[in-house]
Image (cartoon, rainbow, N blue to C red):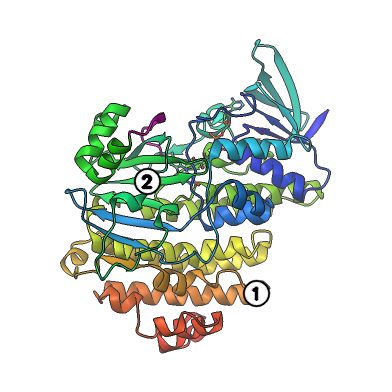
Amino acid sequence: MVYDVAIIGAGLAGLSLARQMSLELGDVSVCLIHDKSFPNPLAVHKVGESAVEIGSYYLRESLHLKDYLQNKHIVKMGLRILHTDSDGVSYKEMGIEGTPYHEAYQMDRGLLENDLYELVKNKVVIHENHRFINVEKKDGLHHIVALDQNSEQKLIKARWMVDASGRRRCLAKKFNFKTEFPLTHSAVWFRVDGFVDLNNFYVSDSSENVFKGFNRSHSTVHLMGRGYWVWLIPLAGGKTSIGIVFDENIHNARDLINQEKAFLWLKSNQLGLYNELMSKNYAVLDFKYFRRYTYVSDEFISHDNWAVIGEAKAFIDPLYSNGTDFIAYENTMVCNTIAAYLRGEETKRYIDLYNDFLSSMITSFVSCHYNSYAGFDSWYYLYAKTNMDAIFYFAYHCVIFMNNKLNELDFLCDSLKIFSPLQESFHKFLNYVKSEDFKLCQKKAKDFIPLGPSIEAMMNRDIICENNNNESVMKLLRDNLYVFERLVERVMKGEDFENIFYPPQASSCLEDEPSEVANWRYGAFYPSPPLEAAQ
Ligand SMILES: Cc1cc2nc3c(=O)[nH]c(=O)nc-3n(C[C@H](O)[C@H](O)[C@H](O)COP(=O)(O)OP(=O)(O)OC[C@H]3O[C@@H](n4cnc5c(N)ncnc54)[C@H](O)[C@@H]3O)c2cc1C
């Protein structure tokens, strides 16, 4: 048999692509070649547990998993950033102070992959315990060779081949892709058998504390310090994922090389968390070390009918939990290209545009993280960066994906004309906050910073257009560009963030309809109308 598509690797990227194709491409024939068997063991040793808006939208809407995610995983209470003092008790906090506007999830990866497997196993052929070892192109088809556990060879023929083999990067090795390693970040990661509840060890009865009484423990919690951050992600079943992510230019990788050392490191750097772990004596379920995890290979979809997705393509940085976002974008672009191919259409335009699109997306994410960890001990830097990074994310990439615009090539081309100045403005901001000028103009920031009135009201609420026709979505993108550029100008003028992110009109408009929020964004807040300015 000749398959339309052969996918190598049944991890999150491969399984979700198989599900997406079976939902969107009718009677397409797909096979998955996977080197292990299902179900995954409980300690599956996988990261990627926290999803944000794009990845969550993809799982919920494109893969039709809304009820499943709500029932079997945890609905996330946004990102919560804490700047902690060395006494292990005092802290500052930034986060949303209500339910997030767009639902996102904390996912147990082993469970999610097992359940995706159950969903696709009757729709696609799954060659379990078969390890991809080689591929040749013959007569216009990929002849893929996989080995089973007894070293027996299986030949699988397919019109398209998609590499979803994660960090093993089967095709990158086979075809010798050019690969860059732009960041010097590393991580250790483990899970404990228990619910590590922030409310037990970082609480404040300060009158300024806007988060009192709010269920913060379902957030993705980041404990920040110079050159590093520590994540806490609650998982269904009462477990907690804990990761220490650091820049090797600032922290010595040898100090975290095993579980014992990682705990000693926590004692020196995050005493509050260390004391909590020690006092509860949680069992540690697994431990993994990712040395210099960032890489980007320069191939995505080839004119020779193959593609690379998920970590087989690239991984940049976990700070904003964007791994599943990239899977969402890549899978949808690959699915659209193969759909066009199966309809007998010319695929060149899809492939060229999607390759450009993904590479510009990757460039912005790399710039966002480049040399950024050194500033994580400055509350003012975190204040600026968290707000602006999030607003940048919502301004363009969320709008395109969550209004289902990836399949509209003319629209996508036009939208890149907006993305280009947006990206330029973002780069200006990123350079500025690393500069001496920024250090000199730092002002006192509040200890408890609500992100709802800034990020949500400024950019996040209206990302899905009620009428997602091209005109409405393009207008939203232009407006977002206008707002973003004004924000960058004001940050670079050294204005106080309290004025920039929280204009006096904000609180009275937040309860109003989206159109009123738009008025606030463009009218009361910014005197000139955005369309004139941006067109
Ligand atoms: C430190 C860290 C933290 C992260 N945190 C987050 C986060 O909070 N949120 C988020 O969204 N993302 C996060 N990510 C990214 C996330 O882990 C990845 O996006 C995701 O796991 C990639 O999935 P994948 O399917 O591409 O790869 P994998 O999950 O690795 O799946 C690849 C599969 O291919 C199989 N395979 C390998 N070789 C072969 C072969 N030769 N033949 C057949 N099968 C093969 C493997 O068994 C494996 O199951 C994080 C990444 C890191 C490094």
The residue beneath circle 1 is 466
Indicate left or right for 229 with 322 as reference. left
Q: Is mark 1 within 8 Å of ligand 1?
A: no
Residue drawn at the location 45% of the way across and 46% of the way down = 234
Amino acid of disc 2: Trp
Relative image position of residue 357 (x, y in whole percent): 55, 55
Marker disc for residue 32: none
The residue beneath circle 2 is 231
- Asked whether residue 479 is drawn in magenta, I would say no
Relative image position of residue 320 (x, y in whole percent): 42, 52
Relative image position of residue 41 (x, y in whole percent): 56, 27
The magenta segment: 281-295
**N-term mark: 1 or 2:** 2
Tag 1: Cα neighbours inside 10 Å, few (<14), some, or many (≥20)?
few
Amino acid of disc 1: Glu
Q: Nearer the viewer, residue 506 or 429?
A: 506
